[in-house]
Amino acid sequence: MLLDVHDLHVEFHTRDGVARAVNGVSYGVDEGETLAVLGESGSGKSVTAQAIMGILDVPPGRITGGEVIFKGRDLLPLKEEQRRKVRGAEMAMIFQDALSSLNPVLSVGDQLGEMFTVHRGMSKKDARAKAVELMDRVRIPAARERVRQYPHQFSGGMRQRIMIAMALALEPALIIADEPTTALDVTVQAQVMELLAELQREYRMGLILITHDLGVVADVADRIAVMYAGRIVESAPVHDIYKAPAHPYTRGLLDSIPRLDQKGRELYAIKGLPPNLMDIPPGCAFHPRCPMARDVCRTDEPPLYEVTESETDRGSACHFWRECLHG
Amino acid sequence: MAELSKNDEQVGTTPNVSGVEVVEARTEAEEVAALEVPVERGEPILQVRNLVKHFPLTQGILFKKSVGAVKAVDGISFDLYQGETLGIVGESGCGKSTVARLLMNLERATAGEIFYKGQDITRLSGKALKAVRRNIQMVFQDPYTSLNPRMTVGDIIGEPFEIHPEVAPKGDRRKKVQDLLDVVGLNPEYINRYPHQFSGGQRQRIGIARGLALNPEIIICDEPVSALDVSVQAQVINLMEGLQNEFNLSYLFIAHDLSIVRHISDRVGVMYLGKMAEIGTDAQIYDHPTHPYTQALLSAVPVPDPEARANRERIILTGDVPSPANPPSGCRFRTRCWKAQDKCAEEVPLLAVPERFKDSDTPAAHESACHFAEEKDVVHAA
Ligand SMILES: Nc1ncnc2c1ncn2[C@@H]1O[C@H](COP(=O)(O)OP(=O)(O)OP(=O)(O)O)[C@@H](O)[C@H]1O
Ligand SMILES: Nc1ncnc2c1ncn2[C@@H]1O[C@H](COP(=O)(O)OP(=O)(O)OP(=O)(O)O)[C@@H](O)[C@H]1O
Ligand code: SF4
Ligand code: SF4
Ligand SMILES: [Mg+2]
Ligand SMILES: [Mg+2]
C-alpha cells in the first residue's frame, strides 16, 4: 500500500462547540490506483485530505487519533520541516479553485519554476525550461509564449491544467485531487479528467479523487470510499458498488440521481438533512434518515463489517449490510 | 416551425411575429383583460422572437467610449407551452441567465420581442406590466445570497404581497404565508425564523414559496438546485414537479446539469455563445441530437455506470469557448467543431429542421442550427 490511513480522528474547536469532522476514517490507495472519496458537503472529505497532506488548520483543527502511513512510515509524528519535504516532492494536492490557489502576482512560469529551484536546486533558466515543458505536457497551447503570463490571463480550464502541472512537477507518488473539476463546464471537465487519468497512468501515481459526482466516480475510479458524518460507511471496488450497494446511504445516493441515458422515474429522495457535526446521532449516524433503521441502529455504532459475500475486498458500516446488498 | 427561427435577423428590424397570435389591445384595460385569459395546456404561453441583449463595452473613465459589445444573447427564438417544462442548457457564459433576466423584465432587451399571451411585454407599462410581473416569477440559484438575512421567513415570502396587495389582503397574509410554507414542505411554525437558521435545501424551499406567493403562471428557475447536495437536490426536484402539477405551472428550467434537465424537462434548448444551437423534446435532444455541440456536450457527461465507461464514445473538444464580445463569423461553434468546413465560416446556420429530415418523421426532425446536421447517439453505450 502506498498510502494507508488508519482510524483517523479530527476535531475542530470552535466558539459554538466541538465539531467532530473525522471520526475514524480508514482508507488506502496503491500506486497506479484511483480511489474516489464520495460524500455530501461537510462529510469530512477535505479535512481528511488536509490531515494526510499536513495542511490542516491547526488550531482550530486537531488530530486526535490515527495514523497516516505513507510508503511505510507514519507521517503524523513528523516535524513540519520533514512534512514540507514530503509535500510537493512525494505527494501533491490539486484544489477545486485554481484561481485562489495560484499566486496572482507571479507569472505561471515563475510559479512552476519555483518547484524546481526550491526543491531541486535548479538554476532559474533550467527551471523556466522545465516550466515550459510541463505546460506543454498539460496541453497549454503556445506554452513558450504563455509561460510569462499571469493566472488571470488563463481560462478556468487552463488554470486547472496549470494546477495539475504544478502538482506533477516533481513526479510525486500520490496526488490528492479535491473536486478538481467541480467549478468547470462539462466539456472542460472532460478534458481535465482525461488529462489527469492519462498522466496518472503514465507516472503510475496513486490518485485520491474527492468528489460528490457519481458520474465522475463511475468514469475513472478503481475503488470508492463513501463518507458520511466523518466516517467511511462503504468501501468497495467501483463495479461492485454500482451493481449492488451494501449500505443504505450509498443506495440512497445512487437512487437520487437522474440519468442522462433514460427518462426516469420519480427520484428517490433521502429524507431529512445531513447531521450536525457538533451533535452526531448516537448509534449509526445515518439512522434518522435510514429507511432500514431498527432499534439496534439507534444505540450501537456499526463497525466496518467485511462484506464476506463478495469476492473482492469490500466493507460496509451497516448492521444490515446483507439485507441491503440483496434488497 | 422553421420559419419562426430566423436567428440571424438584423437587430432592430420590424417585429417578428411568426407563429404568434398577436393581441391587439388599445387601452390599458384591454391589455390587462387579455392577460387574464387562461391559456390551454400545450398552447404557447410565452413566445420569444429574435431576442437580443448586447452589453456595451466601454473604455475611458471621463469620456466613456463604446468599443464594442458583449453579445450575451444574440437572436434567440423559442416558445414555452402552458404546463410544460422547457429546459435550457449550455456552458457558463452562453447567456442563460441573461435570457432569464430579460424574460423577467429585469434587463431591457436590445432588440426582439417577448410575447406573453400574445402581447409583447417589452412594450407594456403601467397596470399591464404589473400584471405580467405577477404572473412570471423567478427562483434563483443561490439560496444563500438571494434571501435577505435580516428579514424573517414570513417577511421574505410575504414581501410580494406588498407590491400586489390584491392577491392577499393584509389580514390574510400570515395565514397565506403559512400555507405556502406547508406547500413547500416546511413547518408553518418556522414563520418567524431567519434564513441562517435553515439549511441550503430549506432555503431553496423558501425561495420557491416566495416564487409561488402570487399564484404565477410561469416560473423561471435559474439553476435552482445547483448549489445543493445530491440527496437534497432530489427532494427539491420532486417538490418542484409536484407543485407544477398542483398549480398548473409552466417552467423555464435553466441548469448546467444535463441529467437533471432531462429528468425534469419536456423539451430542451441547447445554447452556445448567445444562440440556440438545437431545440426539441427531451428524447429528440438526448437520444437523437443532430448538432455537433449538443453531441459533444452530452458525450462529455459521465454517466453513473462503470460498465458504460469503455463503450461510450467520448468527444473531447479542444480549445475554449470564444469571447461573446468577438464571436466567430458564420457558425459560432466552428472554432471547436470537428466537422467545420468553409461554409461554416461564411454562413450563419439558421435554427430550423434540417432540410434532409424535413419530410420524414424521425426524431432527428427537430430544429438544429447546423449546416451539416446529422444524428449521432452519444449517450448510450454501444
Ligand atoms: N477551518 C475549520 N474550522 C472549523 N471547522 C471546520 C474547518 N474546516 C472544516 N471544518 C468542519 O469540518 C467539517 C467537514 O468539512 P470538510 O471540508 O472536510 O467537508 P467536505 O466533505 O470536504 O465537504 P464539501 O463537499 O462541502 O467540500 C465541516 O462541516 C466543518 O464543520
Ligand atoms: N451586466 C453585464 N454587463 C456586461 N456583461 C455581462 C453582464 N451580464 C452578463 N454579461 C456577460 O454576458 C454573457 C452571458 O452571461 P450569462 O450570465 O447570461 O451566462 P450564463 O449562461 O448564465 O452563465 P453561467 O452558467 O455561468 O451562469 C457572459 O459573457 C457575461 O460575462
Ligand atoms: S446500521 Fe441501521 S441505520 Fe445505519 S445504515 Fe444500517 S440499517 Fe441504516
Ligand atoms: S455549422 Fe459547421 S461548424 Fe457549425 S456545428 Fe455545423 S458543422 Fe460544425
Ligand atoms: Mg471539501
Ligand atoms: Mg447563469
Image (tube, coloured by chain):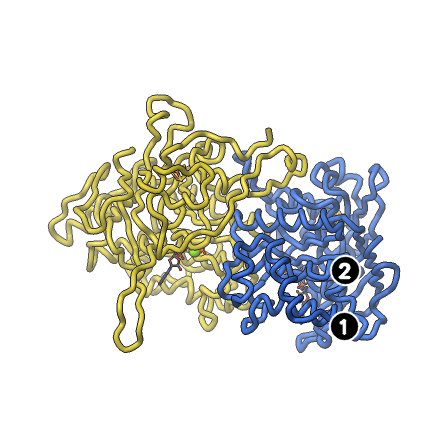
**Quadrant location, ligand no. 4:** top left
* Rendered-image quadrant of the N terminus of chain B: top left
Marked residue nearer the N-terminal end (1 or 2): 1
Residue of label 1: A62
Q: Colour of chain A?
A: blue
Name the residue rendered at 66%, 70% in the picture: A114
Q: Colour of chain B?
A: yellow
The amino acid marked with disc number 2 is Pro
Query: Which of the two residues, A171 or B214, is positioned nearer the viewer here?
Result: A171
| CB contact under 8 Å: marks 1 and 2 | no
Q: CA distance from mark 1 to mark 2?
A: 22 Å
Provide residue B29's location: percent of width, then percent of height.
15, 52
B325 horizontally vs B149: left or right? left
Provide residue A252's location: percent of width, then percent of height.
66, 45
Provide residue A55's location: percent of width, then percent of height.
72, 70
Query: Which of the two residues, A107 or B163, is positioned nearer the viewer here?
Result: A107
Residue of label 2: A282
What is the secondary structure assignment of the residue under circle 2?
A: loop
B68 horizontally vs A239: left or right? left
